[in-house]
Amino acid sequence: MTPGTVLVHLINGSVVVGSLMTKLPQVFCIWRSRSVLGLSEASVVLEALGYCTAALYSATMRYPIGTYGETLSLSLQGLLIVLLFWFFSQNINLGMRFCGLVLWLGFVPLFLLASPPPLLIYLVGLTPPCLFSVARLQQIIVNHRQGHTGQLSPITLLLQCCGCAARIFTTFHVIAGDSVVLLSFSSSFLLNAVLVTQVIKFKRTTKALTARPSSEKAATHAE
């Protein structure tokens, strides 16, 4: 085993282990504040869907589990954030949302068992970068309009940036530079970097806002 191969295996393991706590700071922020202030529902839903679709693509391509294990973990954590968002949101139609969730959860095993044609697999592989881009652009726009980042966790964003950078490296060395996977991680890295920049830019405003009483937060969020 060459030093390069050892390095790749170490990075794979580190990314998978690190992914177990990537979204936990965001979960903690929401649970502690009992608020989803500043978060975009479209962003959290599309991001969770993107992780699940990315894992589905890699599993269908029979890639080593070490190259996409973190997407499985992030799919579950993303789903937890979606459920927390729905739980702490007011005046939303939970029935329609849960129906959509059940349909998606039913589609995944069917797709894996159906032996889909290569073109369909390729299209599924292109879906995650599109979903991630729309999700993060949505959150970037929301942050820009409201002038703060609310309960968005900077730790989660930094961990995601590091994970994407590591995956760009391992993609070249383990799965022959799959262009679909590279596109997904590269676009995610750039947009996460923009979100980190917004967290830094709006740090003072966000800190002042999140320090307010819950009633004032709700009023601001309603605006």
Image: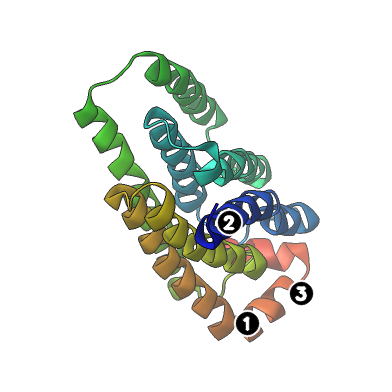
Residue extending furthest toward the front: 1
Earlier in the chain: of badge 1 and badge 2, it is 2
Q: Are marks 1 and 3 in contact (CB under 8 Å)?
A: no
| Percent position of residue 149, x then y | 57, 71
Looking at the image, which residue is at 28% across and 52% down? 179
Residue type pointed to by label 2:
Val
Residue type pointed to by label 1:
Lys
Q: Residues within 10 Å of mark 1 (few under 14, many from 20)?
A: some
Up-down relation of residue 37 to residue 94 (above or below)? below
Query: In this figure, which residue is indicated by the disc labeled 3?
Result: 211
SS at circle 3: loop
Q: CA distance from mark 1 to mark 2?
A: 40 Å
| Percent position of residue 110, x then y | 41, 15
Residue type pointed to by label 3:
Ala
Q: Is residue 184 left or right of residue 201?
A: left
| Percent position of residue 182, x then y | 35, 55
In the picture, residue 141 is in which quadrant? Answer: bottom left
Say which mark, if any, is on residue 203.
Answer: 1
Up-down relation of residue 64 to residue 186 (above or below)? above
Q: CA distance from mark 1 to mark 3?
A: 12 Å
Disc 3 vs disc 2: which is toward the camera? 2
Q: CA distance from mark 3 to mark 2?
A: 46 Å
**Camera-side residue of 154 and 205:** 154
Say which mark, if any, is on residue 218.
Answer: none
SS at circle 1: helix
Q: Is residue 174 left or right of residue 207?
A: left
**Camera-side residue of 37 and 198:** 198
Query: In this figure, which residue is indicated by the disc labeled 2?
Result: 6
Q: Residues within 10 Å of mark 2 (few under 14, many from 20)?
A: few
Earlier in the chain: of badge 3 and badge 2, it is 2
Up-down relation of residue 116 to residue 76 (above or below)? above
